[in-house]
Amino acid sequence: MRAELLEQIYTVVAQIPDGRITTYGRIAKMTEGATARMVGSAMRHLPDGHELPWHRVINASLKVTDHGGAVNQRAKLRSEGILFDAVGRVPRECLWP
DNA sequence: ACTGGGGCCAGAG
DNA sequence: ACTCTGGCCCCAG
């Protein structure tokens, strides 16, 4: 990853408010040159000690992508007041921006 | 230089 | 609502 893109991605993620979520694709569009896959990759390789709300980033279907940490991620979101429907999807009104 | 694979997405059936 | 396809760009081997 180019450091410049990483910074932009981190900056956007850091701005996601409590109790809201956004998607990989939306973050990609807010940056210049990043793609959704890069955002996903950036979230996977987050450095230790970061303060980023990575759990608020989900996929375009408004579901938490299943990759192993999914259970923990859903737990974090629930603790912020986000509700999941029967299919595991997040309501649209939680979307940021 | 080449290949396969990523926490993806929009569009078309 | 679900599956398939092509495109995306950056790594690691």
Image: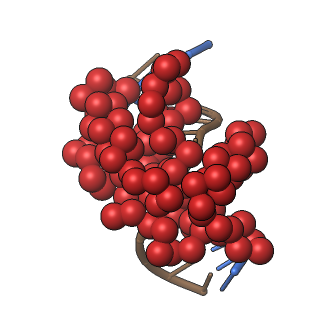
Chain colours: A red, B brown, C blue
In x, y percent, where is residue A63? 63, 62
Q: Nearer the viewer, residue A60 or B11?
A: A60
Task: State the quadrant of the C terminus of chain A.
Answer: bottom left
Q: Give residue A95's quadrant in the image.
A: bottom left
Q: Tell me if residue A65 can be seen.
A: no
Q: Residue drawn 54% across and 58% down? A: A59
Q: Residue drawn 52% across and 26% down? A: A45
In x, y percent, where is residue A74? 68, 52
Q: Is residue C13 above or below residue A66?
A: above
User: In the figure, is residue A42 to the left or right of A26?
Assistant: right
Q: Is residue A49 above or below residue A11?
A: above
Task: State the quadrant of the N terminus of chain A.
Answer: top left
**Number of marks in the rendered image:** 0
Q: Nearer the viewer, residue A32 or A9?
A: A9
User: In the figure, is residue B10 to the left or right of A79?
Assistant: left
In x, y percent, where is residue C7? 39, 55
Q: Nearer the viewer, residue A62 or C5?
A: A62
Q: Residue drawn 71% across and 43% down? A: A72
Q: Tell me if residue A96 can be seen.
A: yes
Q: Nearer the viewer, residue C11 or A95?
A: A95
Q: Residue drawn 30% across and 26% down? A: A2
In x, y percent, where is residue A65? 65, 52
Q: Is residue A67 above or below residue A42?
A: below
